[in-house]
């Protein structure tokens, strides 16, 4: 007896089909899985055997062979438990064929026969749907996630016994409109809590509008962490497509828990400075997305930047440049998207009080401290904002500062302008402008052009700084709704220039 069942697996954030073929024939009783199974898949036979027994069936004393095709790709994870078990039961004639034919099946089994959720359901279901499959059986805990694929009939079960009984549950439905609400989350901290600091708030508004990387530098307690944590509240809303892409990454990472089926907020990831290179970019025997990918379309916040190991920071360059990161292993390689906005915070010197009489750091200590951050990383930061100490009068001022919702409106308007302008250029934000596109879109007024030339000579700007200034002034002009960059826009952009890598060597 032969049974063929359709299942799937993921590489990176893309799913692919795996055909599970089960054959039961006469011969020496054994249970074999072929087709390049990884260790978790090899162990599958023990789970399947016991789960079937505990669901009330006796495995025949025959030769059971399972083949996972295509045989040239290594299969990892426990998601093949359920298709293998259903294949075996089908060969034994215990299951209605029509339930499982033309149906994608994924799920992990417990020894008692219950079905447990697995990682990567969304990408697998999505790719199966694209290849023409219209029906899937998934663990109950993954049903919402699978139902995000519009047009797919999703059936979810809690145990093998439920499937055997042949009771077909209702198609699982979720209300996308309800899940995908782009309204502001009231629980996230708001900019109205921050007293004063108008300059830094403005810098953050520009960063959010053009998706520019930003570095905050200031004394301890000046509010850098407080400000950075409020950034998500002014970032433009996610589109549905962006939401799906982020959700795929979280699905593969196994982070869609507690009833979350769709990520609707821009991610904000703040790894501790002791983070390893593998945790930052992704890794592991079976490659998993790292912090840079979990921050995709959102913010990667590196607080206390100089405390991070230099080699860890160095590794950020490639994902920041390419917008994706490839992890290679002996048997497989996976590419994860990593288009994030970097927000970093640091003190200006080792003791933190540079410029104050409390500071006793020597020039060489300060230089050594700043050198911890590599030049190429600093070169990728468009906006530098000094965070001054908040004054007493600002602190006691009980008048409410501008709320995040108000700032967000301006950011959203600037984003709409960019989406419209770059619709045929393949980019979404000013920070992603290439040199030819800058020539096309960063048109300066005459006096602005003059100021930039002056600044270039007198400040000794590098080509890279020149381009950064142009991109930031493009965003400032967009926040004002101007197509041409004026001298005011440019002058403001020059204020965020900060130090560049040349200054630090
Ligand atoms: N502008 C401000 N308005 C209101 N409260 C503020 C402001 N700045 C700082 N604070 C208060 O000071 C606390 C410390 O700020 P925060 O932790 O953000 O400082 P920091 O610059 O990150 O310091 P460190 O360099 O030590 O990490 C905040 O939790 C907040 O209560
Ligand atoms: Mg801090």
Image: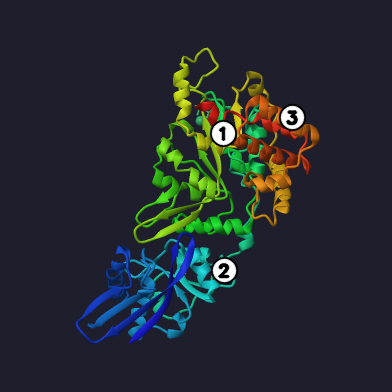
Disc count in the image?
A: 3
Expressed as whole percent of the image width and height from the top left, the position of residue 44 reads 31, 68
Q: Which residue lies furthest to the top in this view?
A: 357
Q: Residue furthest left?
A: 28
Q: Viewer-proximal residue, 373 or 446?
A: 446
Residue beneath disc 2: 173
Query: With respect to residue 377, does 323 lie above or below?
Result: below
Residue 496 appears in the figure: yes
Q: Viewer-proximal residue, 183 or 220?
A: 220
Does residue 336 appear to the left or right of 398 in the view shown? Answer: left
Determine crowd level at label 2: few under 14, some 14-19, many 20+ residues with C-alpha closer than 10 A.
some
Residue 153 appears in the figure: no
Q: Viewer-proximal residue, 203 or 477?
A: 477
Q: What element carries label 1?
A: strand
Q: Quadrant of residue 333?
A: bottom left
Residue beneath disc 3: 451
**Mark 1 touches mark 2? (CB < 8 Å):** no
Please state, as top left, top right, bottom left or bottom right, where the N terminus lies in the image: bottom left
Q: Is mark 2 on a helix, strand or loop?
A: loop
Cα–Cα span, label 1 and label 2? 44 Å
**Mark 1 touches mark 3? (CB < 8 Å):** no
Expressed as whole percent of the image width and height from the top left, the position of residue 136 reads 49, 73
Mark 2 vs 3, N-terminal side:
2
Mark 1 vs 2, N-terminal side:
2
Q: In which quarter of the image is residue 114?
A: bottom left
Residue beneath disc 1: 215
Cα–Cα span, label 2 and label 3? 59 Å
Residue drawn at x 48%, y 60% is 13
Residue drawn at x 69%, y 57% is 424
Mark 1 vs 3, N-terminal side:
1
Q: Which residue lies furthest to the right in this view?
A: 446
The tag on residue 251 is: none
């Amino acid at each position: 007896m032969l049974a063929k069942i359709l299942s799937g697996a993921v590489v990176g954030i893309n799913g692919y089909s795996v055909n599970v073929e089960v054959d039961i024939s006469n011969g020496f009783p054994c249970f074999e899985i072929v087709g390049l199974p990884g260790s978790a898949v090899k162990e599958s036979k023990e789970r399947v055997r016991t789960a079937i027994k505990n669901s009330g069936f006796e495995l025949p004393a025959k030769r059971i062979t399972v083949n996972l095709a295509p045989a040239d790709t290594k299969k990892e994870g426990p998601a093949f438990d359920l298709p293998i078990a259903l294949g075996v039961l089908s060969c034994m004639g215990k299951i209605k064929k029509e339930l499982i034919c033309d149906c994608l099946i994924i799920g992990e089994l417990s020894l008692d026969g219950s079905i447990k959720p697995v990682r990567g359901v969304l990408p697998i279901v999505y790719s199966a749907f694209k290849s023409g499959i219209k029906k899937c059986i998934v663990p109950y805990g993954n049903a919402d996630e699978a139902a995000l694929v519009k047009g797919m009939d999703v059936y979810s079960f809690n145990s093998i016994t439920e499937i055997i009984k042949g009771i077909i549950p209702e198609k699982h439905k979720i209300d996308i409109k309800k899940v995908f609400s782009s309204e502001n989350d009231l629980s996230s901290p708001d900019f109205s809590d921050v007293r004063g600091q108008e300059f830094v708030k403005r810098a953050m508004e520009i960063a959010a509008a053009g998706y520019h990387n930003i570095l905050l530098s200031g004394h301890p307690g000046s509010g850098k962490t407080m400000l950075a944590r409020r950034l998500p509240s002014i970032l433009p809303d996610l589109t549905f497509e962006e939401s799906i892409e982020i959700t795929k990454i979280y699905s593969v990472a196994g982070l869609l828990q507690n009833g979350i089926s769709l990520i609707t907020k821009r991610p904000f990831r703040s790894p501790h400075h002791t983070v390893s290179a593998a945790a930052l970019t992704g890794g592991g025997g079976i490659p998993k997305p790292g912090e840079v990918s979990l921050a995709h379309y959102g913010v990667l916040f590196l607080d206390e930047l100089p405390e991070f190991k230099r080699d860890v920071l160095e590794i950020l360059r490639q994902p920041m440049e390419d917008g994706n990161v490839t992890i290679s292993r002996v048997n497989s390689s996976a590419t994860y998207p990593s288009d994030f906005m970097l927000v970093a915070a640091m003190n200006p010197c080792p003791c933190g009080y540079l410029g104050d009489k409390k500071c006793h750091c020597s020039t060489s200590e300060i230089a050594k401290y700043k050198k911890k951050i590599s030049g190429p990383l600093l070169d990728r930061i468009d906006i530098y904002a000094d965070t001054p100490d908040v004054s007493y009068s600002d602190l006691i001022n009980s008048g409410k500062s501008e709320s995040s919702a108000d700032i967000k409106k301006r950011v959203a308007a600037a984003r709409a302008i960019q989406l419209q302008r770059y619709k045929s250029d393949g980019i979404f934000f000013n920070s992603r402008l290439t040199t030819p596109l800058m020539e096309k879109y960063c048109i300066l007024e005459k006096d602005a052009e003059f100021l930039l030339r002056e600044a270039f000579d007198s400040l000794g700007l590098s080509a890279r700084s020149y381009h950064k200034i142009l991109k930031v002034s493009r965003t400032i002009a967009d926040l004002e709704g101007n197509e041409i960059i004026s001298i005011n826009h440019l002058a403001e952009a020059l204020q965020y220039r900060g130090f560049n890598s040349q200054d630090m060597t």
